[in-house]
Image (tube, helix red, strand yellow):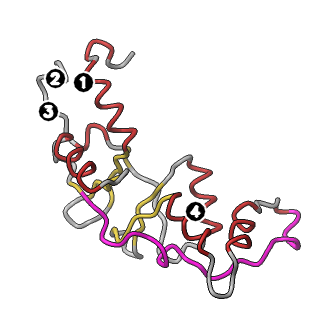
């Protein structure tokens, strides 16, 4: 079956079971999640697991570069850079109470698993966003599509003979 003759759906190109964080996740933990899972963004879910926002490395860097009234930007960047090992816990820099909910994007773009990839690409382009959350009818995240996923889909469409090579 040729990918050209079959319209790709969001579920065909999404990364299933995305790494999610909660609104109360603090900036140091968010940085660890991004690093450990090698992702650049994540859905933000409430206690029931429903999507309430989305957060990215760019959001994190922007927030840290702004600082707060009480905390200068350099201190926040130092907190992110400090990954000290567990044996050095006495030297860990205290973290200010800055949580994901303070800088996440609320009401992120969500699409259904059966939305066409072409429609998802149009939405991403029109809204200038780099990731969309694929959610079920109850707004539970089932996947995520990034611009890199779109590039991969484009490559499969343009080179259908090289699929799965």
Left or right: 34 as drawn, with respect to 90: left
State the separation of the CA atoms marked 1 and 4. 34 Å
Q: Is residue 48 magenta?
A: no
Q: Residues within 10 Å of mark 1 (few under 14, many from 20)?
A: some
Which element carries disc 2, helix, strand or loop? loop
Q: Is residue 141 above or below residue 71?
A: above
State the separation of the CA atoms marked 3 and 4. 37 Å
State the extent of the magenta-drawn residues as a range.
87-110
Q: Is residue 93 magenta?
A: yes
Residue position for label 3: 7
State the separation of the CA atoms marked 3 and 2. 7 Å
Q: Is residue 100 above or below residue 124?
A: below
- The reply to whether callout 1 and callout 4 are in contact (CB within 8 Å) is no
- Mark 4 or mark 3, which is nearer the start of the sequence? 3
Residue at 40 percent across and 74 percent down: it is: 46
State the separation of the CA atoms marked 3 and 1. 10 Å
- Identify the mark at residue 4; answer none if there is no mark: 2
């Amino acid at each position: 079956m040729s990918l050209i003759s079959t319209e790709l759906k969001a579920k065909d190109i999404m990364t299933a079971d995305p790494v999610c964080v909660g609104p109360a996740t603090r900036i140091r933990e968010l940085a660890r999640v991004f690093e450990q899972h090698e992702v650049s963004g994540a859905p933000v879910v409430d206690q029931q697991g429903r999507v309430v926002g989305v957060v990215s490395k760019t959001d994190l860097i922007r927030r840290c570069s702004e600082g707060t009234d009480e905390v200068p930007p350099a201190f926040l960047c130092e907190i992110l850079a400090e990954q000290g090992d567990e044996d050095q816990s006495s030297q860990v820099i205290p973290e200010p109470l800055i949580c994901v909910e303070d800088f996440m994007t609320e009401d992120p773009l969500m699409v259904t698993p059966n939305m066409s990839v072409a429609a998802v690409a149009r939405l991403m382009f029109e809204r200038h966003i780099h990731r969309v959350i694929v959610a079920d009818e109850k707004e539970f995240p089932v996947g995520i599509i990034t611009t890199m996923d779109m590039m991969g889909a484009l490559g499969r469409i343009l080179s259908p003979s090289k699929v799965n090579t």
